[in-house]
Amino acid sequence: MKISILILFLCSLTLRAKEPSVEQSGKPNILFIALDDLNNWIGCLGGHPQALTPNLDRLAAQSVLFTNAHCVGSACNPSRTAIFTGQSPATTGLYRNGQSMRELLPEAELLPDYLRREGYYASGSGKMLHYFINASSWDTYFPDKEKEDPFPFTLYPEERPVSIPRAGKWMYVETDWAALDCTDEEFGGDYAVSNYIADRLADPDHGEGKPFFLACGFYRPHEPWFVPKKYFEPFPLESIQLPLGYKADDLEDIPERGQKYARNRYFDHIRKHDQWKQAIQGYLASIYFADCQLGRVLDALDKSPHKDNTIVVLWSDHGWHLGEKEHWQKYTAWHDNTNVPLMIRVPEGTTGLVAGTQPARCTRPVSLLSLYPTLLELAGLPEREENDGPSLVPLLENPNASWNHVAVTHLDHPGDMGISDQEYRYIRYRDGSEELYHLPTDPHEWHNLSADHTHTKALEAIRKKAPTKLAPLRETPLKS
Ligand SMILES: [Ca+2]
Ligand SMILES: [Ca+2]
């Protein structure tokens, strides 16, 4: 009996010895952090003068901060699907929130699937995919992956709406804002997510001997803008400044289809109820709340045994309008919606970038489509043919490296898109109408130059970069 136990023990030792440790495999861990609906209203991007984001700014100061980064799709689902499949809506036909990723792309090998096949351990918490977890892609998840609900308990006011009445069925049920009289613990939500992630980072055995991919999905500043009241306190209502990009006659030089994307019923409704500043306050408070939860994760990483072998990637799925172009929400091709925070920090000794990253600001036009191939290259894994985007490793190595790519954002109809190059923003609609903005002189995209002959060359050059092959919008198969 004793001998058989000894043999079993020796066998288990042998098996263990065959499992590569992080150090032996040389593969870096990856901390993959997402925020939801966060535009460039963060200190280091300067989108709003009152944004309070010490932790985003702290990470940015240690990373390559991409100041000209754009989402691939103009809303959560197409954006996140593109990040996790490595494929553009122009390839997959998934352009909208209403399309089911799992039904349309059942064979897609998601980023954590690929990494697991290559020896990684994948874990996560909070919103990564569009309101589902995809349990089969992860070793472990919080909350329980089998329930497919990525949200921990979150406190909501007992009676809703709190601040703005429903205007009709068209109005999203979560459009509302309020300071809640509760602690972070009582609020739950992203606070619970940050706890879970911090605990994983503190665990020397997280990954069970494998390198890990740890996904941290914060839901704020997605609506509703309810957060504990202490996060509202730095933003007294009388101090609130309107968005820098707001211009009352901004739509006059925009083609008809652009105007349809611009005007929606929310902004009028919000102004009618005198809630514009209150809403801005709610958004700023929600950003500050998310930033503080991020701070808890960054603190945990600083103290973690994994600190020196973990890549940090932080992104938001798209931006958000708060009145610019008369628009509220997302779904547009303007910078307010497409420009996203993106920062990447790579430690020294990482297989695909041995020197690691130096803190820098990179102004090259990049897309979140690049996250999948970038992480594969950093981890020293084989390239994946299906990936549509270029790896960002050349820019992580040298943020001023030459870069011939543009960043394309697809709207919810194939053929409607926004494209960024180094200086210009080009918007094209499916009826052929266009907009062109020169961002260094017009950062808020107020002056449409598409008919201005002094910019004809730039217009022709960026037009040629527009994708010509566009998968048709795919219908989700009807459930039988
Ligand atoms: Ca979103
Ligand atoms: Ca204008």
Image: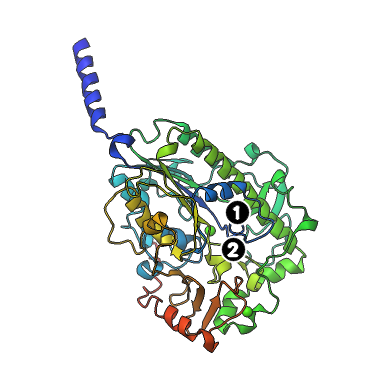
Q: Residue 146 placed where, x, y %?
A: 42, 43
The residue positioned 45% from the left and 37% from the top of the image is 307
Tell me if 1 is positioned left or right of 178 in this view. left
> Eyeballing the image, is 115 above or below 205?
below
Callout count = 2
- Report the front residue among 449 and 356: 356
Model colouring: rainbow
The residue positioned 49% from the left and 54% from the top of the image is 360
> Eyeballing the image, is 249 above or below 189?
below
> Mark 1, residues whose alpha carbon is within 10 Å: few (<14), some, or many (≥20)?
many
* Residue at far right of view: 238
The residues bearing labels 1 and 2 have C-alpha atoms spaced at a distance of: 10 Å
**Which residue in the protein does label 1 denote?**
221
The residue positioned 50% from the left and 60% from the top of the image is 76
Quadrant location of the C terminus in the rendered image = bottom left
Q: Secondary structure at mark 1?
A: loop
Q: Amino acid at mark 2?
A: Trp
Q: Amino acid at mark 1?
A: Pro
**Which residue in the protein does label 2 denote?**
320
Quadrant location of the N terminus in the rendered image = top left
Q: Residue 322 placed where, x, y %?
A: 65, 65
Question: Which circle's residue, 1 or 2, is located before the other in the chain?
Answer: 1
Determine if residue 101 is in view: no
The residue positioned 40% from the left and 76% from the top of the image is 465
Q: Secondary structure at mark 2?
A: loop
Q: Are marks 1 and 2 in contact (CB under 8 Å)?
A: yes
Label disc, if present, on residue 265 of the rendered structure? none
Q: Residue 21 placed where, x, y %?
A: 31, 34
The quadrant of the rendered image in which ligand 2 is seen is bottom right
